[in-house]
Image (cartoon, helix red, strand yellow):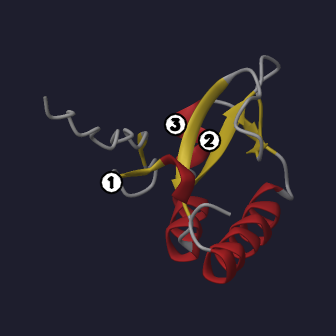
Amino acid sequence: MAKAKKQKKVRKIPMRKDLLTNEMRPKKEMVRIVRDPEGLISIDSSGKKSGRGAYVSLNPAAIATAQKQHLVERALTGTVSETFYDDLYAYVDHRKARVELFGPDA
């Protein structure tokens, strides 16, 4: 009797829709932005904060457009702090640098 070959299990990659460009991208390539129950919008680096969430890709040009058009505020119907976009730019730059150095799983 011949033994059956084990097939390698293919893992499903979770996809999320980019709030700014409406493209579906892998979740690991995105940044989650969350509106907490008090209505304040912030960056969710852990991906586990409670509240309404939306995902943004690591594209500084798209973030600049979102800032001009107030897309994040409209999508999450909340208030953005004065430093939110500065923090978001810094976080995106940091994440992009990590991806370039260590790959997408970093």
Identify the residue at horizontal 59%, vertical 73% (top origin): 103
Image quarter in which the N terminus is found? top left
Q: Secondary structure at mark 1?
A: loop
Who comes first in sequence, dot 1 or dot 3?
Answer: 1
Q: Position of residue 40 (x, y in %)?
A: 80, 32
Residue bearing mark 2: 73
Q: Which mark is residue 75?
A: 3
Amino acid type shown at disc 2: Glu
CA distance separating discs 2 and 3:
6 Å
Crowding near pointer 1: few (<14 within 10 Å), some, many (20+)? few
Q: Position of residue 105 (x, y in %)?
A: 60, 60
Crowding near pointer 2: few (<14 within 10 Å), some, many (20+)? some
Front-lying residue, 23 or 80: 23
Q: Secondary structure at mark 2?
A: helix
- Camera-near label (1 vs 3) is 1
Amino acid type shown at disc 3: Ala
Residue bearing mark 1: 23
Q: Is residue 61 left or right of residue 11?
A: right
Q: Position of residue 89 (x, y in %)?
A: 72, 69
Q: Contact, CB < 8 Å: mark 2 with mark 3?
A: yes
Residue farthest front in this picture:
1
Position of residue 65 relative to residue 70, above or below, is below
CA distance separating discs 2 and 1:
19 Å
Crowding near pointer 3: few (<14 within 10 Å), some, many (20+)? few
The image quarter containing residue 15 is top left
Q: Contact, CB < 8 Å: mark 2 with mark 1?
A: no
The image quarter containing residue 2 is top left
Front-lying residue, 98 or 85: 98
Identify the residue at horizontal 43%, vertical 42% (top origin): 16
